[in-house]
Amino acid sequence: MKYKIIAISVTIVLALFLLMGCSGSEEATAPEPAAEEAAVPAPDAGEVEEAVVEEQADEEEETEEADTELEEPEEEEAPATPEVKEFRLSGKNYEFSLDEIKVNQGDTVKIVFRSESGSHDWVVDEFDAATERVQADEESSVEFVADKAGTFEFYCSVGDHRTRGMVGKLIVE
Ligand SMILES: [Cu+2]
């Protein structure tokens, strides 16, 4: 659009100059060359270059806008980074306060385990994760990386607590 407007205005200015220049001598023949000039796009090299530069500037602006539009959703869709997920649970004869713990693969899992009464611990064989065995009102924690997906059983390894129901599921998605 800008190119066309500039080209048209340049032709009009040239036509006016020609009209003024010729009007003094030959009024009858003057309009003919002026009309020809108006029909042909402005031959002025300087003006054409300017118009081209402006067009390029427009294109650059457009691509910049397109780039920022593309970048924004990428930031929103950033992949989930591994996190430290902490769970506090307690145990008593013969159950845990949580029977299911859910994490994402790659997460660092921190278990803070406390005994409400009796001697207990919290163990998952598949991750070699185990707290200390604690007595009533004592606390012990363990941290491990859930580097494989699946459903694993956590349990209390004291006596026959596992078969008595001190078990739960660790779900790694
Ligand atoms: Cu136990």
Image (spheres, rainbow, N blue to C red):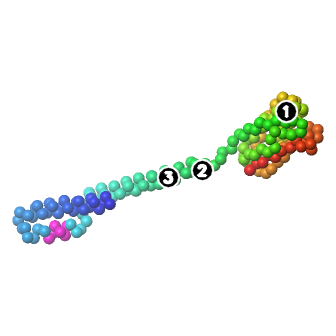
The span from disc 2 to disc 3 (Cα, nearest Å) is 14 Å
- The answer to which quarter of the image holds residue 81 is top right
33 or 98, nearer to the observer: 98
Q: Residue furthest right?
A: 159
Does residue 167 appear in the picture of this structure? yes
Residue 54 image position (x, y, % from top left): 33, 55
Q: Amino acid at mark 3?
A: Glu
Q: Which mark is residue 155?
A: none
**Does 11 sit left or right of 134 as displayed?**
left
Residue 69, disc? 3
Label 1 SS? strand
Please indicate, yes or no, whether residue 142 appears anywhere in the rendered image. no
Q: Is residue 140 above or below residue 105?
A: above
State which tag comes first along the sequence, 2 or 3.
3
Q: Position of residue 75 (x, y in %)?
A: 56, 48
Looking at the rendered structure, the kind of residue marked 1 is Ser
Question: In the rendered structure, which segment of residues is drawn in magenta?
Answer: 32-37
In the rendered structure, which disc, 3 or 1, sits on the residue that comes first in sequence?
3
